Image (cartoon, grey):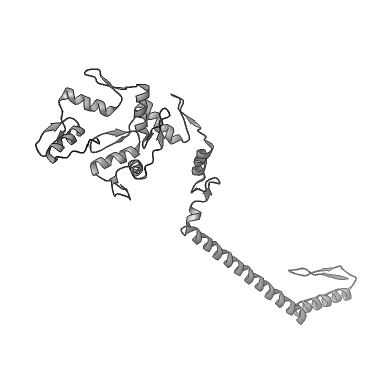
Amino acid sequence: MCFIIPSDHQHQDVCKEGNGLANQQLCNQEKKVSLDQKEAEPPQMKEEQEELCTSQEGEQLVLMQEANTLVQNSRSTRNAALKPKSHSSCNPYSCQRCGKSFNQRVHLTVHMRVHTGEKPYSCETCGKNFSERGKLTVHMRTHTGERPYSCQSCGKSFSERGPLTVHMRTHTGEKPYSCETCGKNFSERGQLTVHMRTHTGERPYSCETCGKGFSERGKLTVHMRVHTGEKPYSCETCGKNFSERGQLTVHMRIHTGEKPYSCETCGKNFTQRGQLTVHMRVHTGERPYSCKT
C-alpha cells in the first residue's frame, strides 16, 4: 500500500512494502497520477494565483506612494523650518502682565522680576541686591575699581561699555538725539529727556521740605543742601567748603589765576561766564533791569 504526502516544495511517497509485484506496480501508477496532477493545475487555481500576484503588486504600489508622500512632507517641513519666521514667531514668549514679547524664555524670566520685584543676586560686600547677574557684575567693579573699557583716544577707562560709547561722542562730536521742538542735538538720550522739560515745563522732582520743583534729580540733590547745610566739596588750598562742585571749580581760579572767559571785543578775561555776560553790556549798551517805580 502507498501513501502520498504533499509538501510546499516537494512530494514524498511513502510506500509500504507489500507482498508481490502487483502492489509495487499499483504504487508506481499512483505516483505517476500524482505527478501528472502537479504538472497540470486547474485553470481556476492559476487565476487565483494571478489575482494574488496582482493584489500584492497593488499593495506594493500603494506602499511606495505612501512612502513618497512621507518623503515629500518631510522635505516640505524641513524647507519651512529654514524659511524666516514671522515677527510674532520670533518672540514666542510674552509677558501676561504687560504684553512685552521675548525670543527666549530666560529673557522673559528676567523681565518678570520687574513686576515681582525679585532681586536674587546679592553683593557680598555691601549687601545690595540686583535682578540680573550682569548688573551685580558691573556693581562689583565699584568695590574692586575695575574699569575694563578704555577710550583709545584719551585712555579714560570705564566700568561699563555704555558709558564708553557715550564718551566717544566727545571725540567724534556725534549727537544722535535731536529735539523735535527746537532742533537742538544731544549726545545722550538722558540729556534730551531733561531738555524736553524746558518745553513742557515738567518738574518731576520736588523738595519735600519747601515744595520747590526741579527738572533734574541732581538739581534737587544740590537744593536739599540749602536745608541740610551740607557742603561736601572742600578747597584743598584754603579749606573753604561748598555745596556744589561747580562752586569749588570757580573758587579754585582764585588760587590758580585762571580766567577762561574772554571778551571778543576788548580781550578782557574773566573767571566766570556770568561776569563776561555782565561785561558785554558795556559794549552793547544793554540795560535789562528797569526800576518799576
Query: What is the tally of numbered marks visible in this picture?
Result: 0
Q: Position of residue 112 (x, y in %)?
A: 52, 41
Q: Is residue 147 above or below residue 199?
A: above
Q: Is residue 96 left or right of residue 9?
A: left
Locate residue 169: give its quadrant. top left
Residue 42 shows in this picture: no
Between 15 and 290, the one lying in front of the other is: 290
Percent position of residue 260, x then y: 16, 32
Q: Residue at x 37, y 34 (%)?
A: 217
Q: Nearer the viewer, residue 284 or 153?
A: 284
Residue nearest the viewer, comparing 66 with 277? 277
The single residue placed furthest to the front in the displayed view is: 293
Q: Residue at x 48, y 53 (%)?
A: 90
Residue 187: x %, y % from top left: 29, 43
| Nearer to me, 184 or 20 | 184
Q: Quadrant of residue 212?
A: top left
Q: Quadrant of the C terminus?
A: top left
Q: Residue at x 17, y 22 (%)?
A: 255
Position of the N terminus by quadrant = bottom right
Query: Which residue is most to the top?
Result: 239
Which residue lies at the image location 35% right of the left edge and 41% below the top edge? 194
Residue projecting furthest to the right: 19
Residue 196 visible = yes
286 to 54, vertically: above or below: above
**Residue 176, percent across and down?**
30, 47
Q: For the view shown, which residue lies furthest in the left direction?
A: 266
Residue 207 falls left or right of residue 50: left
